[in-house]
Image (tube, grey):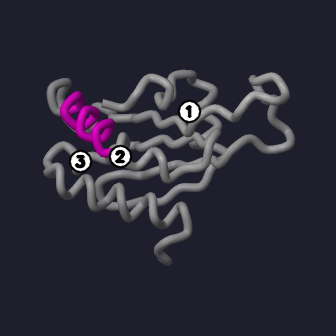
């Protein structure tokens, strides 16, 4: 399970990652990534405090499947992201959006697509 301090909860944070961040698409999912705060953003912490940890959120629509399938996909993605969240710099926002094929995909397929997307966003793998 992804620790509470690494969870993305606010609508504004989801919107910032999706609208103003970079993205990497794969057949089963799309990962939206926004690195730490830019000069136009207000920093929620007082000067001298450390930046918040990287946070991740998940979007799994009804196109993926019924409630049971959607929850299974979310649990799998949360578990996969738990081991990968430390790759992102502090203050980063990450949104993982599952695509319709994710409902039928296995754990290993989701892991491969997530790894490829994360590497692409962090500069590890060219298109």
Q: Which residue is mark 2?
A: 83
Picture residue at 40% right of the left edge, 35% below the top: 58
Q: Position of residue 74 (x, y in %)?
A: 28, 34
Report the span colored magenta.
70-80
Number of numbered discs on residues: 3
Name the residue: 75% across, 28% down.
49
Q: Secondary structure at mark 3?
A: helix
Please tell me which of labels 1 and 3 falls first in the chain.
1
Does residue 112 lie above or below 92 as drawn? below
Report which residue position mark 1 lands on.
14
Residues packed near mark 3 inside 10 Å, few (<14), some (14 to 19) or many (20 plus)? many
Quadrant of the rendered structure where residue 116 is?
A: bottom left
For the residues labelled 3 and 2, the Cα–Cα distance comes to 19 Å
Tag 2: Cα neighbours inside 10 Å, few (<14), some, or many (≥20)? few
Looking at the picture, how far across and down is residue 80, in whole percent?
A: 30, 45
- Asked whether 120 or 54 is in front, the reply is 54
Residue ID at (25%, 33%): 75
Q: Quadrant of the N terminus?
A: top left
Which residue lies under the disc numbered 3? 102
Determine whether, in the image, residue 2 is placed left or right of residue 53: left
Could you say where residue 44 lies in the image, as x and y percent from the top left? 75, 23
Q: Is 1 colored magenta in this rendering?
A: no
Mark 1: few, some, or many residues within 10 Å (few <14, many ≥20)? many
Residue found at the far bottom of this picture: 126
């Amino acid at each position: 399970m992804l620790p509470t301090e690494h969870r993305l909860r606010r609508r504004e944070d989801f919107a910032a990652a999706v609208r103003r961040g970079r993205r990497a698409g794969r057949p089963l999912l799309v990962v939206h990534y926004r690195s730490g705060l830019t000069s136009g953003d207000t920093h929620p912490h007082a000067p001298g405090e450390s930046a918040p940890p990287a946070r991740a959120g998940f979007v799994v629509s009804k196109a993926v499947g019924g409630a049971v399938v959607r929850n299974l996909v979310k649990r799998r993605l949360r578990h996969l992201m738990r081991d990968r969240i430390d790759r992102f710099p502090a203050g980063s926002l990450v949104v993982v959006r599952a695509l319709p094929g994710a409902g039928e995909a296995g754990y290993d397929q989701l892991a491969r697509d997530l790894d490829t997307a994360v590497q692409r966003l962090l500069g590890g793998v060219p298109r």
